Each structure stands twice: as C-alpha cells, then as structure tokens.
Amino acid sequence: MSWNEPGGGKKDPWSGRNDKNDPPDLDEVIRSLQDKLGGIFGGGSKGGLGNGPSMKGVGLLAAGAAILWGLSGFYTVDEGTRGVVTRFGAYVNTTQPGLNWHIPSPVEQVAVINVEQQRFIEVGYRSGGGQGMGSVPKEAMMLTKDENIVDVRLAVQYQVKDARDYAFNVLDPASTLKQVTESVQRGVIGRSDMDFVLTEGRSDIVLAVKSEIQAVMDAYKTGILITSVNLQDAQPPEQVQGSFEDAIKAREDKQRLINEAEAYSNDVVPKARGAASRIVQESEGYKEKVIARANGDVSRFSQLLTEYKKAPAVTKQRMYIEAMELVLGRSNNVLVDVKGGNNIMYLPLEKLANKAVEDASSAPLISHEPVSLPSQPVKEIKTDVRASSRDRDVRGR
C-alpha cells in the first residue's frame, strides 16, 4: 500500500511520521473535490481521475449557470431615475422606472441616472459647507461696458432632461456647464453698465444668463435643463468699496432733491394755472363789457344821428348843452349871473382841496357815467345860454 492511498496513514517515505495535526496535502484536496463532483454527475472513481464528468452532468451545470446568468440581468429602476442600457459600450435604449431586464454583463451594462435631482454649480464663489461664501476672484471679477470691474457671484441649478444625451454626448456635463456659465456671464456683464449691474438690472441679467446658457447647452446636446439662475451678489471690488458708497450716497441725494423739486412743482404749477385761468376769465369778462358798452355807444350815436338829420340846429344845441353839463358838472366852479352881463366866477378853494383828496382816495380816475350838477347852477347856466341865444337872435333881426 502506498503512503498516499486510503488507509496508508498519511505516512510519507521521507519523514516516517503520522502527524494528525499537519495540514491536508494539495493532491488530497484536488482528489476529494473530484470525488464529490463525480458523485454529483455520476462518473469517476474515488481512487483516481477516472473518466471525468458525464455529458449529462456538464449540460446540467451549463444550464444552471445560464439560468443564474440570465437572472442577473433583472434590475429595478427607481422613481425619478432612468436606466441607460449599453451593449458593448453602444447605446441600446432608455428604461423607465420599474422592473426591467437586460442581457447580463459583459454583453450589456446599465447606468442609472437621476433625472429629478436638483444639481447646482457655483461661479465666483464656493459655499464652504455652511461657513459663508468664499470668493474666487479668478471667476468673480468681470469687466463692465463702461470699463469698471465688478465682483459677481452666480449659482445655477439644473437637472437632467435627457439621460442618453447626459450620459454620452459630453464627457463631464457639470464642468461643461460651469465653463459655459462663466463665458455667458462675462458676455452679459460686458454688455451692461456698472450702475445697471449693481442696481436695477439684476433681474434682467439673470434672465439673459439663463436663456443664453440653455441655448448653448441645447446646442451641445448635453441633456441638461437649467431650472434657475441666482445672482448671489454683485458689488465693486473691496479696494474701491468706500468710493462706491460715496457715489451711491451722492446719487441718493440727487434723487431726493429731484423728488423735492417735483413736489414743489406739483404744488406751485396748479396754483399758477388757476391764477392764469382766473385772469383769462376776468379778461374775457372785461372784453364782453367793453364790447357791450361800445355797442351801446354806437346805438346811442345812431339814434342821435337820426335826430340830428331831423333838426340839426336843435340837436346841435342840445348836444352842446349836455356836453357843457358833463364838463362843468365835474368841477366846483360856481357861475353867478349879474345884471351887467359879466359872469363872476367864484372858486371855493377849501372845498376843491377836500374834493381832490376824496377823489384820489376813493373815486375812479375816469368815470364813464355822467355826473349830475346841482340843479340851481345848471338852471343858471341854461338861463345864461338861452339869454345869450336871444341876444344873438335880436341882433340878427
């Protein structure tokens, strides 16, 4: 019996020992494995390699392996994700959420991509894990249209809209998006003035940047959808921050003065317009009054002309008397008729002085209404005029 046959006691010809604690020999392990396989598939002897496994056993083994390999092709796609199936590296199809199957590896591979996750990139700063924003001057410093430098910090949120394009068309979609964002942002800022960027132009800048980024990413077929663009901060560099604050204060003072001037204008202009309207209305009233008076004078003179044509001498005499009555009625001269034929003029100086003071203080300078003379002087004047007329008539005869 050889030393390595069953029952040989595991004695080798070199040591002559029988140590039960020694590790099993490699040949013995191989032989034991062969015996077990032979028992399963019905072939082979326990004492040697024998004739190997039968064809039936090999078929069963291959069938079992094929079943296990096929079962390994089942996979689950979660909600909000898509499965991109490739065959030897080439795109095959995109699977929807649920249980799916593909030809197992190494023939086909599946890459599961989340299409609902909100991803983001930062340009000009880094969030720093909740410890504030750390500036990245190389990305943040930008030149405006009026040749000023501003520090702009931008955040872009995006998600995957096409899993195939996202997986195959661009090697690093996030890096590509960041480079495109920085380029577009510099272009938009370069077309704007500094005041526009720092004040009222923020919303317009955000809309322009978002639109241009989406256009570029669609042209590259990256499969990315830009959901939002946030302008985190826009300010001048720290070196000129003080001067810029002074400029802002001056601009605010200017606006305040403009507002005060507009308020004063809104208060004064309506009053001036009201006064002008009142003056115009008074002028229109005066105009109508003068026209009416003139029309009345015309009517009176027309009537007088008619009477003059009928009796010229009488009309002329009456006009003369009325004129003298009007003229002499405005003075305080007193005419006294005496028998000698010479009239004596009596001037009451005290009354004249008092009358002048009263006229200057109360009476209008020009009166369009006739002033009535006292009855006695008028009668004396009329008597004197009639007497003179009679004398002329007597002389004429």
Image (cartoon, helix red, strand yellow):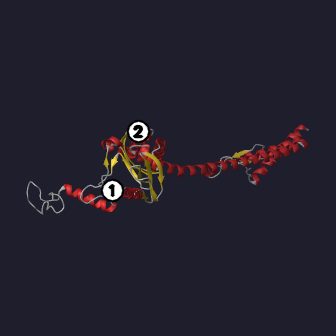
Q: Is 270 drawn above or below residue 309 in the view shown?
A: below
In front: 294, or 142? 142
Q: Position of residue 181 (x, y in %)?
A: 41, 43
Q: Is residue 167 visible?
A: yes
Q: Nearer the viewer, mark 2 or mark 1?
A: 1
Residue appearing at x 82%, y 44% in the figure = 301
Q: Quadrant of residue 52?
A: bottom left
Instruction: Report the amino acid beneath label 1.
Output: Pro
In the image shown, does 87 or 312 lie closer to the viewer? 87
Residue at (45, 46) in percent of width and height? 91
Relative image position of residue 16 (x, y in whole percent):
8, 58
Q: Which residue is mark 2?
A: 144
Viewer-nearest residue: 246 or 50: 50
- Look at mark 1 in the image and give the residue it sits on: 53
Q: Is residue 47 above or below residue 248?
A: below
Q: Residues within 10 Å of mark 1 (few under 14, many from 20)?
A: some
